[in-house]
Image (cartoon, coloured by chain):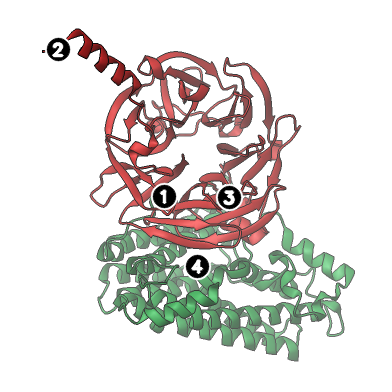
Amino acid sequence: MTTRRAFLAAMAASALTPRLSWADAGSPAFLACAREPSGQHALFGIDFLGHDVFRVPLPGRGHAGAAHPVAPEAVGFARRPGTFALVIDCARGEVLHRLESPEGRHFMGHGTFLKGGDILATLENDYITARGKIGLWARSEGYRRVGEIETHGIGPHEALLMPDGSLAVANGGIRTDPRVDDGRGKLNLPEMKPSLAYVSPEGALLDQVFLDPELHLNSIRHLARGADGLIGFAMQWQGDAMDAPPLLGLHRRGWSAAKLAEAPLGEQLAMQGYAGSVALSGDGQYFGITSPRGGRLHVFDREARFVTSHHRPDICGLAAGPEGFLATDGLGGVWHATATEFQPFTRAERAWDNHVVTL
Amino acid sequence: MRLTAVITAFALGLAAPCQAGVKEAVEGYVLPATGAFAGAAEALAEEARGNCLPGAGMVAAYDEAFDAWLQIAHLRFGPLEVDGRVNAIAFWPDKKGFTPRMLAGLIADADPIVDQPDEFHELSVAARGFFALERLLYDPQFAGYGEADYTCRLVQAISADLARMAAEIDSDWRTEAAPLLMSAGAPGNSTYLSQGEATRVLYTALLTGLEFNADQRLGRPLGTFERPRPARAEARRSGRSLRNVEASMLGLRALARSLMAPEAMPVTEAGFADVLDHIAALQDPVLAGVEDPSGRLKVEILQQRIRAVQVDVQGEIGAHFGLTAGFNSADGD
């Protein structure tokens, strides 16, 4: 029989029980999606040396994830133009919530946590008006959608939290509509105007940088950031790959223009006009971009000077490692990369998907 | 670091028997072809040293070296990718007109780099290789030089640079790339983490080479129906546009056969034979016919036949090895 005293003691104990943390999920260092030989897709937690820490099956192909800063919760986003995202308890391997994008919207595959993890921000395409939106969801209210703000551009793909609490947004510039070619058709290439926008949590445009007109086909897609606010943005060229355009830009708020980074011509051509991921090295000294089409990881310094090229077929996922970078590829490899080294950590029978998220 | 990897691969490689196709492709196709290219490029350099003028001797040596290059040009991994060699050997397409501009600049300045073979590789890829040489030998803007002119020394320097790169590719293949491919999946091999990866890299080279012929070598001059672009044909100054497609297809067929050996590949064989028949019947060496409807149709048909070989290769060779396109390269975002 439960006495009143025992009941109160139990209540107090449960209130004092620490909430779950990433340690309860095995302390993974990175999150990445993969396709397994059976065709099953799954979200993996991996440690600093590339070993599996946990695996959670996914209902379909994911793109990127957002990791909660404290709780072992990850949000896996369906690939563009998916309309769902899953909040996953990585300690228990359970789906906690399924988020649906509102009518007339779809997710873009990326999102990030704001305000210490209280708010999830999701990149969205409002395809009726072709305006980029960021949906805001309150974790404490079971991920209820509590608002949305403008990205001040078309086709936003990724956003990053800045040190001052604002957001840097990669507005890819490409108009798509899920009702046309399954959302993969590009509807405005002649007029596309990608931008990097800095937006307050309330949606005010704080700063915005565009590319020179001759580079307007360079879709700004992915972002990495230094502790000091220096942004590296990776681009995907919508013109002829033989134009060998720059694929990495560096920008800091207040600069009137971005610094563009290019490898020597032969190496630049090898990237096939496509950068799939960007990351800042763990020591903060180098930006890396990957091209799965060119089988290349290009490393640049913070002054946008080319440092080196590592070769690996289908390499795409890239994240900051304790030293240098951690990279993944479609052949199941997990790699350790620095300005001078490129060595495999592990290999498994699975195809790692486009992105790796650092915890 | 590279040396360490190679030694480890040698030491441990014997433990893992490599897949039959990889060994056959390396020993039966790649190494003979890199050896032949090194020999042909050295012959070109020798010819240039003897008589740099754009006469019959240089033309024949140029053609032989270019043909030999096209047997391996699609092996875009390992030795061909070191120091940007692929582009330094064959910088095409030159969309921004870098090559003539840089050559004109070198000639105007009588840049002494032509007398510094150890530094010549520091020049931009656009001023080196077969397409720089083609400008000097065939383009009226450059080709009127005499033996005493700077351009003669430039022809010699570019030829010597080509011969050096060809020799390095052959040597790198024999000492590094071949052992790495044949020890794929062995402990310590940090280039090919499984045997399947060795097969895959050769298979990808095959498919990418076919795609390059269809999309670039034929696709660039085809342009659009409203706007054909005959001036964009590869190596049209040397009259080699169609010959390049043929030489490349022969090299790709050799790669495909060796990769499948000892199995036959009847569907792919038929596809290659069909393409070579169409090339023989085309009689349009620089693809100038893309400008008139009937000539254009013939080039388009050839392009379709090459694309059909891509499908044949996927269905026959890809299926045999259980290979599909790269997960990320085929479908990114």
Chain A as rendered: colour? red
Which of the labelled discs sits on residue B330, or is there none? 1
Location of mark 4 (residue):
B77
What is the quadrant of residue A189 in the picture?
Answer: top right
Residue closer to the observer: B320 or A138: A138
Q: CA distance from mark 2 to mark 4?
A: 72 Å
Verify CB contact (< 8 Å) between mark 2 and mark 4: no
What is the quadrant of residue B193 in the picture?
Answer: bottom left
Q: Nearer the viewer, mark 4 or mark 3?
A: 3
Q: CA distance from mark 4 to mark 1?
A: 18 Å
Q: Secondary structure at mark 3?
A: strand
Location of mark 3 (residue):
A288
| Chain coloured green here | B
Q: CA distance from mark 1 to mark 2?
A: 62 Å
Type of amino acid under label 3: Gly
Image coordinates for residue B194, horizontal then vertical, percent: 34, 67
Which of the labelled discs sits on residue A2, or is there none? 2
Type of amino acid under label 1: Ala
Q: For the N terminus of chain B, which image quadrant?
A: bottom right
Type of amino acid under label 2: Thr
